[in-house]
Image (tube, rainbow, N blue to C red):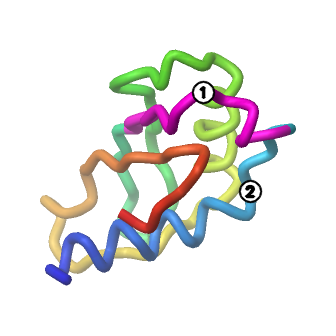
Amino acid sequence: MRNWEAYAATVRERVRPFIVFEDPDAIPGNPSAIVSLLLGPDGMVVTAKLTRSSGVPAWDRAVLAAVERASPLPVLTTPQERRFTITFRPKETGD
């Protein structure tokens, strides 16, 4: 696993417990909500916005709310690494 993949998995693990969504299994398929994040030097979420909708507005809202609640997130070392996108799926497969 590349370093970015390990970091993305760590962030997803941090955020997942904060996702409040009634029944992910009721969503057809496993659509992706892609979130663009900017972290402060301390890992606090400065901005979080949806860059691609999953097509399920309730899932998109749940993910964005969870990212905010999970702040601060793990920090990487360089300023360039504090701006990134990450994918969340209702039926997480560990990608």
Tell me the number on the disc at residue 18.
Answer: 2
Q: Is residue 28 above or below residue 73?
A: above
User: Which residues are drawn in magenta?
Assistant: 23-35
Q: Residue at x 16, y 72 (%)?
A: 78
| Dot 1 alpha-carbon crowd within 10 angstroms: few under 14, some 14 to 19, many 20 or more | few
Q: Quadrant of the N terminus?
A: bottom left
Give the residue type at disc 2. Phe
Q: Is residue 33 magenta?
A: yes
Q: Quadrant of residue 21?
A: top right
> Which mark is nearer the camera, 1 or 2?
1
Give the residue type at disc 1. Pro
Residues tagged 1 and 2 counted as in contact (Cβ below 8 A): no
| Dot 2 alpha-carbon crowd within 10 angstroms: few under 14, some 14 to 19, many 20 or more | some
Q: Quadrant of residue 40?
A: bottom left
Kindly identify which residue carries mark 1.
Answer: 28
Q: Indicate the position of residue 71 as horizontal and vertical percent values.
A: 60, 60
> Viewer-proximal residue, 55 or 28?
28
